[in-house]
Amino acid sequence: MGFTHYLRAVERFRAEGGAVETGFLPFQVAPDAPTDGEPLREVHRRVFGPAAEERTAEFTAVAARSGLDVRFDRAVFVNTRPAHDLIARAAAQGAGERAVALLFDAYFTEGRNVADPAVLRDVAARSGVDADADTGVAADFRATAELGVRAVPLFLFEDGSSVSGAQSPDAFLAALRRVPASR
């Protein structure tokens, strides 16, 4: 939801004549997650216990109010390292925003395994990324760790400010307008 709100703000900012270049720093919530995946619903039950259904229903309702179709009943909990490698490749080819949006759709709405090479090739093709290009680009988790990032979403701006969480598009737009270098 945070990334969707960010993209809405970016679209408005660009329509005002502003320029934004979005970079991506990789962060894995669960770096030990399996690549073959398991139903996210089961993970939520282990983590949140009896409150799992209520918590996911609340988030789903909030997301729906933002126009997002979040389907935790379909989502596959999986190791996201391969998806981060695709994001790095997409960003290097100027398609990072599109690829990330499609990966979120694949994960949260379509219930696809975003570690599956076939899914990643499909997302790459739909975002205009040459998935076979040997760019030598891969996700570099060191920069994120050096910044001390411990949770997502976190949006860092060139002026040193940040926005965390799923803020409103207006909050992101205000942050973009405060950064002189982004105009």
Image: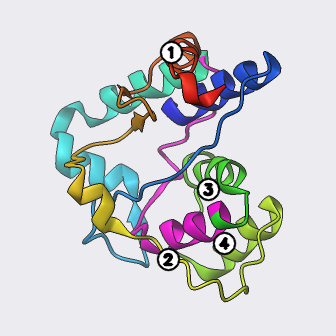
Mark 3 nearby-residue class (10 Å; few <14, some 14–19, many ≥20): many
Q: Position of residue 107 (x, y in %)?
A: 56, 54
CA separation, marks 3 and 1? Answer: 29 Å
Q: Residue at x 72, y 24 (%)?
A: 18
The span shown in magenta is: 66-91
Q: Do the residues bearing badges 3 and 4 touch, measured as CB atoms within 8 Å?
A: no
Which badge, 2 or 1, comes first in the chain's sequence?
A: 2
Amino acid type of the residue tagged 4 in the rendering: Val
Q: Do the residues bearing badges 3 and 1 touch, measured as CB atoms within 8 Å?
A: no
Q: Position of residue 16 (x, y in %)?
A: 78, 15
Question: Depth check: 94 or 183 in front?
Answer: 183
| The stretch drawn in magenta includes residue 75 | yes
Which residue is the site of mark 2?
A: 138
Q: Do the residues bearing badges 2 and 4 touch, measured as CB atoms within 8 Å?
A: no
Q: Position of residue 166 (x, y in %)?
A: 43, 25
- Disc nearest the viewer among 3 and 1: 1
- Disc nearest the viewer among 3 and 2: 2
- Disc nearest the viewer among 1 and 4: 1
